[in-house]
């Protein structure tokens, strides 16, 4: 059974039948409207975020499967902080502040895509992204918070979330 994979990034719950998706799907003989509707249903919980998806198509039977990835770290952080876009000047212009629990939550959601082996390492990675887009954490520059994580300040909190981290495939 010949299969074809289409990888594309769409806005959660708002995929459009236009290019590049529509023409590609119609070339493969699929009902573009139906596929787009299913993509929008599958990505609806990520409204307003960019979401990677893969469509696996059996070219002989025209059966397909939609696999939804996890939005980018930037998208997850922006949604969590309630901002539309990253700061153009993260050093001087902040777009919001998050609690450490929110950073841990983003780290857990991103686990399947991260190379981090531990929750602590994942949190430090997420803090780096937060800093680069103008988000403070616990009212501080995320670079300071990384130092505090390394010093063990958040060990009790991280231990509380270890179980959740370990339950996620990755």
Image: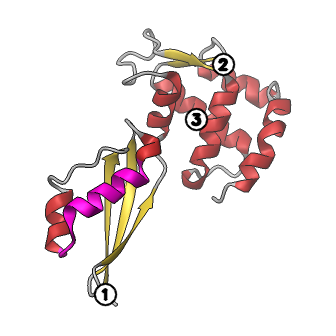
Say which element carries label 2: helix
151 is higher (above) or lower (below) than 43: above
In the visual, does 125 lie left or right of 120? Answer: left
Residue under the point 15% across and 52% down: 18
In depth, the one of 111 and 65 nearer the eye is: 65
Res 144 label: 2
Image location of residue 43, percent across then percent down:
41, 49
In the orientation shown, which residue stands out farthest toward the top?
Answer: 92
Say which element carries label 3: helix
- Does the segment drawn in magenta span residue 34? yes
Q: Residues under labels 2 and 3: Cα distance?
A: 13 Å
Image location of residue 66, percent across then percent down:
39, 64
| On-image quarter of the C terminus | bottom right
Image location of residue 19, percent across then percent down:
15, 54
Residues drawn in magenta: 28-43
Toward which corner of the image does residue 101 lie, by quadrant?
top right
Residue designated by label 3: 126
Which mark sits nearer the N-terminus, 1 or 3? Answer: 1
Colouring chosen for the image of the structure:
secondary structure
Which mark sits nearer the N-terminus, 1 or 2? Answer: 1
In the visual, does 123 lie left or right of 69? Answer: right
In the visual, does 114 lie left or right of 65? Answer: right
* Nearest to viewer (mark 1 / mark 2): 1
Q: Answer few, some or many: residues within 10 Å of disc 2's Cα (few below 14, many 20 plus, some between 14 and 19).
A: few
Residue designated by label 1: 2
Q: CB of mark 1 within 8 Å of CB of mark 2?
A: no
Residue under the point 51% across and 15% down: 96
């Amino acid at each position: 059974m010949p299969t074809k994979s289409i990888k594309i990034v769409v806005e959660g719950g708002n995929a459009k039948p236009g290019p590049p998706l529509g023409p590609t799907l119609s070339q493969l003989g699929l009902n573009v409207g139906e596929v787009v509707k299913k993509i929008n249903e599958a990505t609806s919980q990520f409204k307003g975020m960019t979401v990677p998806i893969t469509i696996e198509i059996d070219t002989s039977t025209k059966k397909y499967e939609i696999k939804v990835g996890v939005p980018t770290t930037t998208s997850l952080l922006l949604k969590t902080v309630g901002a539309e876009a990253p700061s153009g000047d993260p050093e001087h212009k902040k777009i919001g502040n998050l609690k450490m629990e929110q950073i841990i939550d983003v780290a857990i959601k991103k686990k399947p895509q991260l190379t981090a082996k531990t929750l602590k390492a994942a949190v430090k990675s997420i803090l780096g992204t937060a800093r680069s887009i103008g988000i403070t954490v616990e009212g501080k520059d995320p670079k300071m918070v990384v130092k505090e994580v390394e010093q063990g300040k958040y060990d009790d909190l991280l231990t509380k979330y270890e179980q959740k981290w370990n339950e996620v495939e990755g």
